[in-house]
Amino acid sequence: MQIEVVVNCGAGSVESAEADAERERVAETFATLGHQPRIAVVVGAALEAAVTAAAERGADVVAVAGGDGSLGTAATALEGTDAVLGVLPFGTFNHFARDLDIPLELAEAARVTVEGKTTTVDLAEVNGRTFVNNSSIGVYPVMVDLRDEIRSSRGWGKVRAVPVASFRVLRRFPNRRLRISADGEQWHLRSPFVFIGNNRYEVGPKGVGARTGLADGVLCCFVAMVETRLGFARMALASVTRGASSTPTLETVCSDVVRVEAHGHQLLVAIDGEIATLRSPLRYGIRPGALRVRVPQDAEPPAGPPDAPSAGSGVDADG
């Protein structure tokens, strides 16, 4: 099995100054598993080109060391190729890896890349931008934008900057007038929060933010039907304690297409934790089974529609 690794030095826990050390650490990890992969260390925008080049060289698996944003970029490059994505969680939160039961430690994640199995998962998109987890409008992208400003000005890490940014965004409390269409329903409202997930997300006493599957072929849309800080706080508390379905001020709908229109020409949008400014309207879509990825041998298959066939393995455990 031919494996190539791309390390993104723009990921949450990797600094550019550590690039050589990270390359050596990755090389040593795979060597213990009997592989000597070609390793590319890149920064930011060079990631997609490096992943594309690895696939074009005939790699069976392209393992990407980065955060969720890096994996979304890699998914764009790998879709439609013969290569399979390997996940080495180097980000801050690593939601995609967690939802696929991929270990967060490098040694165990590399073992999954080499000895795991291949499954297929859905990808989502907004205005042509691919994402593996979710996208949102309103308080979250503004908070992330403020967080990055604080990190730049104070030299803080992401986790330390989040509470300060969250306090500031609640003071501003962005409310946008929106027109949202999904599954035959329409809303015309002002809202501080719209969330679109790649597949269904759990919100309730049993957990917040986990997905029930990655192969259901749907987008999960949450819309806050409130306009004030107090209303937003009550909605958030109710959804966590009672569940989204029991919170009247949080609309939930699943659909294969979601359209969001805003007054004004542009919207600040979070896409897998990264910020983009996109032109309205936003057109969200789902691409079922678009990505092949390595997961643990004992991982449960991603949930899919009842009549969907099980995903086959493009690369077996022995390569």
Image (cartoon, helix red, strand yellow):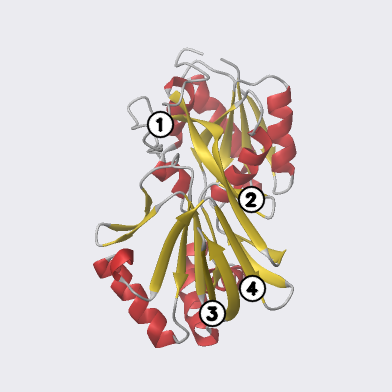
The first of marks 2 and 3 along the sequence is 2
Q: Secondary structure at mark 4?
A: helix
Question: Image quadrant of residue 248?
Answer: bottom left
Q: Residues within 10 Å of mark 4 (few under 14, many from 20)?
A: few
Q: Is residue 155 left or right of residue 308?
A: right
Q: Amino acid at mark 2?
A: Gly
Name the residue type under label 4: Ser
Label placed on residue 153: 4
Query: Which secondary structure, mark 1?
Result: helix
**Is residue 161 among what the camera can see?**
no
Mark 3 or mark 1, earlier in chain: 1
Kindly identify which residue carries mark 1. 108
Between tags 3 and 4, which lies in front?
3
Question: Dot 3, crowdedness within 10 Å: few (<14), some or many (≥20)?
Answer: some
Q: Is residue 96 visible?
A: yes
Report the residue marked by disc 2: 10
Q: Are marks 4 and 2 in contact (CB under 8 Å)?
A: no
